[in-house]
């Protein structure tokens, strides 16, 4: 027994057969947003990304970070 092969397209867009372009207000808002994003990636962008990653790690491991800092402080106080 052979299974029938469907060759017609089963999806449609909200454009209903018309050109699926962006209206002018949406396009200008998108351009403004992309310019804002490019401006945010300035000279300190890499540093800010690194600090956000570090902040996420510390927030996820808050108790472990506190214990580690306390141990390092205790060890450095005894070495002196």
Image (cartoon, rainbow, N blue to C red):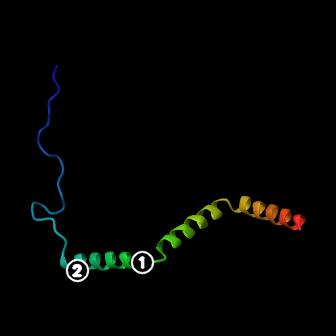
**Residue that appears at 23% across and 76% down:** 27
**Residue 3 numbered tag:** none
Residue in view at x 53 percent, y 72 percent: 47
- Residue 59 in the image: x percent, y percent? 64, 64
- In this figure, what is the number of numbered marks? 2
**Residue topped by disc 2:** 25
- Mark 2 and mark 1 residues within 8 Å of each other at the beta carbon: no
| Mark 2 crowd level (few <14, some 14–19, many ≥20, 10 Å Cα) | few
Q: Position of residue 28 (x, y in %)?
A: 24, 80
- Residue position marked by numbered label 1 in the rendering: 40
Quarter location, residue 39:
bottom left
Residue 73 sits in which quadrant? bottom right
Check disc 1 and report its element: helix, strand or loop: helix
Q: Is residue 63 above or below residue 48?
A: above
- Closer to viewer: mark 2 or mark 1: 1
- For the residue labelled by badge 2, is the local secondary structure a helix, a strand or a loop? helix
**Quarter location, residue 50:** bottom right
Q: Residue furthest front?
A: 80
Give the x, y percent position of residue 56.
59, 64
- The one nearer the camera, 61 or 74, is 74
Whichever of labels 2 and 1 marks the residue nearer the N terminus, that label is 2
- Residue 72 is left or right of residue 54, and the answer is right
Q: Is residue 24 positioned above or below 46 on the image? A: below
Q: Say left or right for 1 vs 59.
A: left
**Position of residue 4 measured from the top left corner of the image (x, y, whole percent):** 14, 30
**In the depicted view, which residue is nearer to us: 63 or 48?**
48
């Amino acid at each position: 027994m052979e299974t029938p092969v469907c060759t017609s397209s089963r999806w449609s867009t909200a454009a209903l057969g018309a050109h699926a372009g962006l209206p002018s207000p949406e396009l200008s808002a998108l351009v403004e947003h992309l310019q804002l994003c490019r401006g945010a990636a300035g000279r300190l962008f890499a540093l800010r990304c690194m600090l956000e990653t570090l902040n996420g790690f510390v927030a996820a491991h808050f108790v472990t970070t506190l214990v580690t800092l306390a141990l390092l402080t205790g060890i450095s106080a005894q070495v002196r």
